[in-house]
Image (spheres, rainbow, N blue to C red):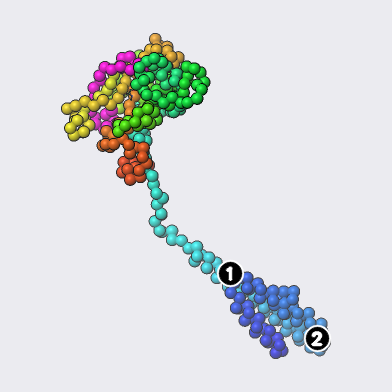
């Protein structure tokens, strides 16, 4: 081979092997075999080569072109393999590492108690109903046999909403109990009814033991021939399941509510000195209840001669504090993460009634 070709060959093969990535590899390819590449130029010059040398020179150039093509292809395969290996190394992951745990929140004790109540009454065939925080005073008071002049309205210390009422007798209020949801249920559904209504309630009260926003759960049963016996059995079963004490003493004591007749407050046995629930030394008031007043049934479109029922109500904060030994009401609403982690419940272990809930 001519010296000049030998030199081109050596330089080109060196350049091909020096290409360190696909980009520089392509630059070498273009510089040699491209339109104005070195070998392309030499092939073009073949026409000006003296005829006696042309054949031999042509064969040599063609051989070089084949050799460069083969070398380029081989280098490309190597570079692509190297690139793939580098990418695999960079993106390597250890699938045997334990997962990074996302921070897990906790279920607020108020929510937990509402879930437990729903689980217990759910097992007795009750469904859960919810309704608006803002109510008309008809749904909140009048339908429940609490007329405008009744002292119970003052007792409630109601938040009245500002602005023109849609009707002079129908001011809007923040509901003072969840009863208006039961009123709505009676108006929209035919008996029999078995429903519990947990939710937020509001009263203009604020001191160490009262918050202007708190939670209640009420319950309502409407059916034919419902008696005080059904009320007592249902609430005794509920309280024993909720506190997880099969022998919990329960006492019914005559009382007064405008929406029930007769009305009863329900006490459980406890020990005032130790705070232990289930003792038999003292009584602790825990629920209000009664047979739904015939006027309330009639107000809600239910014929009291055909249907009877009982209703009850309880404060969620109070029964939560009793069950879990929480002494202060205020942290319920302060979103203190340390308190929430301490008193909160795992979202992975929801309240499910399985042969009773226990402490
Ligand atoms: C208490 C007392 C009570 C009711 C709530 C009720 C609801 C309707 C009809 C009749 Cl729609 N009664 N609810 C009845 C008796 C007592 O709650 O101490 N709550 C914390």
Compare residues 88 and 66 and report the one nearer the observer: 88
Residue appearing at x 49%, y 17% in the figure: 168
Question: What is the crowding at mark 1: few (fewer than 14 residues within 10 Å), some, or many (at least 20)?
Answer: few
* Disc sitting over residue 49 in the figure: 2
Location of the C terminus by quadrant is: top left
Left or right of 280? Residue 210 is right
Percent coordinates x, y for residue 211 in the rendering: 35, 32
Residue appearing at x 70%, y 90% in the figure: 3
Q: Which residues are magenta?
A: 239-263
Residue appearing at x 44%, y 28% in the figure: 133
Could you tell me if residue 144 is visible in this image? yes
Above/below status of 183 relative to 73: above
* Disc sitting over residue 80 in the figure: 1
Percent coordinates x, y for residue 162 in the rendering: 47, 26
* Residue 83 found in image quarter: bottom right
Question: What is the crowding at mark 2: few (fewer than 14 residues within 10 Å), some, or many (at least 20)?
Answer: few
Could you tell me if residue 198 is visible in this image? no
Residue appearing at x 75%, y 79% in the figure: 41
Above/below status of 281 relative to 106: above
Q: Secondary structure at mark 2?
A: loop
Percent coordinates x, y for residue 297 in the rendering: 41, 14
Location of the N terminus by quadrant is: bottom right
Left or right of 278? Residue 335 is right
Task: Indicate which disc, 1 or 2, sits on the residue closer to the N terminus.
Answer: 2
Q: Is residue 217 magenta?
A: no
Q: Is residue 247 magenta?
A: yes
* Residue 283 found in image quarter: top left
Compare residues 208 and 238 and report the one nearer the observer: 208
**Image quadrant, ligand 1:** top left
């Amino acid at each position: 081979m001519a010296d000049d070709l030998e030199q081109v060959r050596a330089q080109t093969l060196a350049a091909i092997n020096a290409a360190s990535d696909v980009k520089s590899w392509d630059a070498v390819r273009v510089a040699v075999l491209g339109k104005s590449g070195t070998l392309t130029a030499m092939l073009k010059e073949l026409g000006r080569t003296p005829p006696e040398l042309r054949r031999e020179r042509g064969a040599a150039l063609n051989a070089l072109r084949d050799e460069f093509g083969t070398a380029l292809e081989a280098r490309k395969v190597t570079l692509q393999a190297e690139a793939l290996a580098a990418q695999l190394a960079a993106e390597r992951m250890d699938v045997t590492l334990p997962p990074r745990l996302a921070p897990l929140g906790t279920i607020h004790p108020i929510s937990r108690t509402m879930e437990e109540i729903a689980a217990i009454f759910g097992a007795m065939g009750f469904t859960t109903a919810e309704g608006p925080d803002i109510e008309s005073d008809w749904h909140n008071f009048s339908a429940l046999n609490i007329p405008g002049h009744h002292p119970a309205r003052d007792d409630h210390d109601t938040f009245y909403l500002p602005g023109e009422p849609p009707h002079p007798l129908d001011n809007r209020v923040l509901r003072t109990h969840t009863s208006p949801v039961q009123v709505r249920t009676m108006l929209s559904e035919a008996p029999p009814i078995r429903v519990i209504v947990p939710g937020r309630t509001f009263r203009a009260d604020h001191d160490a033991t009262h918050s202007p926003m708190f939670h209640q759960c009420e319950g309502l049963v409407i059916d034919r021939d419902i008696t005080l016996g059904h009320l007592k059995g249902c609430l005794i079963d509920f309280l024993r399941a909720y506190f997880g004490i099969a022998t919990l003493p329960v006492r019914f004591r005559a009382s007064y509510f405008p929406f029930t007749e007769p009305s009863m407050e329900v006490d459980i046995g406890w020990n005032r000195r130790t705070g232990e629930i289930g003792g038999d030394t003292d009584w602790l008031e825990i629920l209000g209840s009664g047979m739904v007043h015939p006027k309330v049934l009639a107000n809600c479109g239910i014929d009291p001669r055909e249907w009877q029922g009982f209703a009850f109500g309880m404060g969620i904060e109070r029964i939560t504090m009793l069950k879990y030994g929480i002494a202060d009401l205020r942290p319920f609403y302060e979103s203190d993460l340390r308190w929430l982690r301490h008193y909160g419940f795992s979202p992975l272990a929801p309240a499910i009634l399985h042969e009773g809930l226990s402490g």
